[in-house]
Amino acid sequence: MVPTLKIGRHEVPFPLIQGGMGVRVSGASLAGHVARCGGIGLVASAGIGLGSRFFEGNNYFVAEPLAMKEEIRKAYEIAPDGVIGVNCMVAASDYDVLVRSACEAGAKLIVSGAGLPLNLPGLTEDFPEVALVPIVSSVKAAELICRKWQRGFNRLPDAIVVEDPETAGGHLGARPEDIGAGTYDQMATVRGVKRMLTEKFALDIPVITAGGIWDRSDLLQALEAGADGVQMGTRFVTTEECDASPAFKQAYIDCRPEDIGLIMSPAGLPGRALKANVPALEERERRLGTSCPMGCLRKCSYQASRERFCIISALDRAQRGDTETGLVFCGSNAWRASRIETVQEIFNDLFALQSEEVVNQ
């Protein structure tokens, strides 16, 4: 019997958070069905307005909060009593607006990474029931966030996600030269964060491991090694309920371990993705010579000097099915996907027959 997971005021039967995946890879459908099965479902805020009925081509920052609110509403239609949250990237230009919009729409937690969310408690002070969950990759980053929050807002995190840069997908919170060096010990970092929280802040909150979790064996190993739960993104991509296109899902099914690697994002962060098509999308940007279409990031080499590519457009194209010139973010385990399954089947695999009982209640 695995433990339940309580974050702030919100408790779910299973210790699982579904990772936030943009652009619109984890939208209302995936988040809603994960919540319905007894986990925590996350809508990814990055580029949420693209592909929505609110986007008219030149109103990105208007469409974003409107689409966010609609996506959360749709997720709750699937799981009225579930725990739905939002993953918000600190690096996004409209980070503040998206955090507040998520709270206004009824998100029960904000998971925040791609930068240190040092002002998150200030943005959510009118919503004390919303749990705040920073993503870190080191004990040092976790302690810095705690000290800043305590000093500035008299608030501490409700949980912390520790991301493994060696296995996680998408943007990674580590220097490129440190990834693959063989020096990072994920579970030692999880235990170190737990120890730091206890010794320096007298705080007992869940510490969640993220990256590299695929099956029940991975889950149980993480729990036995000290994690209070897991965050999983990659395996949920190849589900019927995932919001991405069939072509995006097929790219996971078709890929091999050697197809997965690190890229440097225009955001100034390394990221893990299917790497073969990156030259094609860079060539596309050079050929078209387009200017920055959105201004979606606070810091972006493409916006500043046309270096690399427009990442939000590349992610959007891939999500819609253009996996030739689109960017397909993924975790190191993407090659293990062999078929399209359902969210319920994943819960059955991870938690034996317990999940069927939750859904049938």
Image: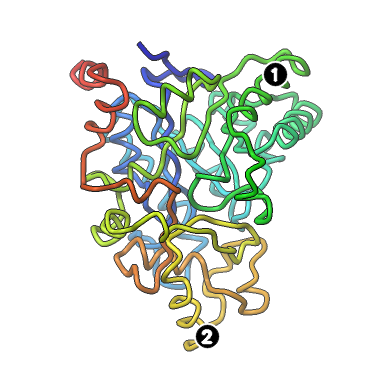
Left-right relation of 153 to 88: right
Instruction: State the residue at coordinates (51%, 36%).
Output: 210
Q: Residue furthest right?
A: 151
Instruction: State the residue at coordinates (26%, 16%).
Output: 354
CA neighbours of label 2 inside 10 A, class few (<14), some (14 to 19), many (20+): some
Quarter of the image holding residue 199?
top right
Name the one closer to the observer, 189 or 121: 189
Instruction: State the residue at coordinates (39%, 74%).
Output: 325
Name the one closer to the observer, 304 or 239: 239
Left-right relation of 360 to 237: left
User: Picture coordinates of residue 79 (x, y %)?
Assistant: 29, 30
| Circles 1 and 2 in contact, beta carbons < 8 Å | no
Residue 36 in view here: yes
Q: Quadrant of the N terminus?
A: top left
User: Picture coordinates of residue 189 (x, y %)?
Assistant: 65, 30
Q: Quadrant of the C terminus?
A: top left
Name the one closer to the observer, 276 or 79: 276
Q: Earlier in the sequence, mark 1 or mark 2?
A: 1
Q: Residue furthest left?
A: 360
Instruction: State the residue at coordinates (41%, 21%).
Output: 220
Q: Is residue 24 above or below residue 164?
A: below
State the residue position of label 2. Answer: 286
State the residue position of label 1. Answer: 195
Q: What amino acid is at disc 1?
A: Arg
Quote the CA–CA distance across marks 1 and 2.
Answer: 49 Å
Q: What amino acid is at disc 2?
A: Arg
